[in-house]
Amino acid sequence: MQKKESISGLILAGGRGTRMGHVDKGLQPFRGKPMAAHVLERLAPQVAAVAINANQNLPTYADFGVPVWVDETTGFAGPLAGLEAGLRHCATDYLLTAPCDSPFLPLDLAARLWDALQAEGADVALAVTQEAGMRKQPHPVFCLVKTSLLPVLSAYLAEGGRRMDGWYTGLKVAEVRFEDADAFRNINTLDELHSLDSARAPRLADVVSCMSGYDPNALPVRDAQRIIRDFVTPIRAVEKVALRSALDRVLAGDIVSPINVPAHDNSAMDGYALRGADLRTDAPTTLKVVATIYAGRPSDVTPVAGECVRIMTGGVMPAGCDSVVPQEFVAAASETGITLDPGTIRTGDNRRFAGEDLKAGSAALKKGKIIRPADLGLLASLGIAEVPVQRRLRVAFFSTGDELRSIGEPLDAGCVYDSNRYTLHGMLTRLGCDIIDMGVVRDEPQALEDALRTACENADAIVTSGGVSVGAADYTRQIMARLGDVTFWKIGMRPGRPLAFGRIASNGKSAFLFGLPGNPVAVMVSFYFFARAALLHMMGADAPLPMLKVKSAGAIRKKPGRTEYQRGILSLDAGGVQQVAITGSQGSGILRSMSEANCMVVLHDEQGNVAVGDQVDVLLFEGLV
Ligand code: AMP
Ligand code: MG
């Protein structure tokens, strides 16, 4: 029997797309075409014919040019209902299924399942994978089934059975082990889809190939920053939060003002609203007070020439009046009239125009803004109670090193307390991330792999410290490289230098990885100058760092050719002018001077020695995160 001729392929696209936000998974664009089209492309050469099982968007699926079969067991009963429809309609003796969200399925899937099914005389053959150190994982949605099994499956469904791996318990099953677990990777959420989409997430090699003179062993800070920026992709998920909870979150959409703010022309002062035309330039002006207007209580009084209205701050300007004289500028006032000297005010003074703060329909806040107290106030002034924000970025972090002890443990000879997890905790928390502190991980391959996989499966980004230089016991590099697209740099900087960066994947999930050096100051500096901007970009935030230029209080020795980040103290000199002085020891393990400093002096690659009084770039710690 010819294998290809006796197998039909079925793309399972009948789900509701619940985890994709109720969009039809198979129709989601991925690398330039719908996901189901990728599956079709890989499945078609392996089988006699392909059909699609779908329960919505049927005309769109019909445009793929293959038959579309809907479930007969109704109510979105899951992939088994799709398989049932497939077995019912299938014209061949065997049916091979693949989910619509598996764009990497193996090209030898049909052949290998067929061979095993024949060899073992089985009814069903399915794919399994097993990654190093992990349990065997069956993939029952990638299965080859004898068409004659329709009655068995229908009976299982009729009894309410829904489990993909439940219906064949009484049958003979052949398991076929595939080496490439990634080929069975399915894409369950829009986030995952976007993070895998090569149009958005290029490979490091592609990013680096655009760069002239790229040398990972002597990479200028700027180039490293650029590669990181070009490589990371923002998360897409958005949530709506109550206005107060939006503080420090990243705005996920432009806010357009629904109203004029203020809604009416009104007075900026407590005083008298008058007609500018009545103001005399040659002699005092005397006006009759005809009414009083309070804020929030508009009046329809219309003063005529020679009349004015007492008005409170925020009171709606009466018709015909265009100016307000503050009450303290009035030369004389009584119940009935006021007098003011020539030149006290000009026409138009102290009048606020409707919409002068914001016009209805104009952009009030831009997507990507980190919401500050002023923004909360602005949103409140528009009457907006709920704000769309990016979901928080999840960042997992751990420290590596056999010499590290956690607080509470005895400090054995030759050991140090882990401080990096605490600085990272502080910096990530201030950045607004959801953090996952994974503790200290030993310099041991299995422990490192487990930690990286767990981090990858639970977070958007991973920050590690230690183990990225070429020390003998540092396995971190090896394991990181094995798990994904990771590069190791020696950056032209001090402190710092070694940095691992890339993206790793585990069990269908991926995460960006920042492997920071171990030295406590190097960790902070690498975080501030590489990870911070990247994480903000992932958060969807538009938050450039403000650098100050300040005179140096002392001479600083500096070698051209690398960037130096020196811990500094910004203060005022005797004349009240800002100046910066370098703090004592700049050793990369000396946290004390980092704690004493209130800023970093950034001495760029091309810069040489700094003389007293020279201007230098300074980055303040406060406000940094
Ligand atoms: P490594 O990059 O792993 O070679 O570490 C460089 C130096 O930083 C070593 O002296 C480590 O003991 C120290 N170090 C690494 N991680 C930490 C940490 N989490 N807390 C304090 N010191 C650390
Ligand atoms: Mg180490």
Image (cartoon, rainbow, N blue to C red):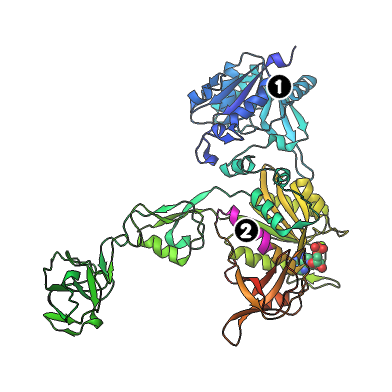
Q: Earlier in the sequence, mark 1 or mark 2?
A: 1
Residue 611 painted magenta: no
Is the C terminus in the top left, top right, bottom left or bottom right quadrant?
Answer: bottom right
Residue 534 painted magenta: yes
Which quarter is ligand 1 in? bottom right
Residue underneath mark 1: 123
For the point 28% across and 63% down, the residue is: 353
Q: Measured along the vertical axis of the image, is residue 4 above or below residue 474?
A: above
Q: Measured along the vertical axis of the image, is residue 541 above or below residue 159?
A: below
Q: In this view, does 521 lie to the left or right of 195?
A: right
Q: Can residue 415 be seen in this view?
A: yes
Q: Where is residue 440 in the image (x, y as percent from the top left)?
A: 75, 62
Q: CB of mark 1 within 8 Å of CB of mark 2?
A: no
**Which residue occupies the extreme bottom position in the image?**
574
Residue 533 shows which numbered tag? Answer: 2
Amino acid bearing label 1: Asp
Q: In this view, does 295 lie to the left or right of 172?
A: left
Local crowd at mark 2 within 10 Å, few (<14), some, or many (≥20)?
many
Local secondary structure at mark 2: helix
Amino acid bearing label 2: Ala
Cα separation between marks 1 and 2: 55 Å
Residue 276 occupies quadrant: bottom left
- Main SS of the magenta segment? helix
Which residues fall within the magenta stretch?
A: 527-541
Q: Measured along the vertical axis of the image, is residue 25 above or below residue 302?
A: above
**Which residue occupies the extreme top position in the image?**
1
Q: Position of residue 18 (x, y in %)?
A: 52, 39
Nearest to the observer: residue 522 or residue 576? 576
Q: Position of residue 209 (x, y in %)?
A: 73, 44
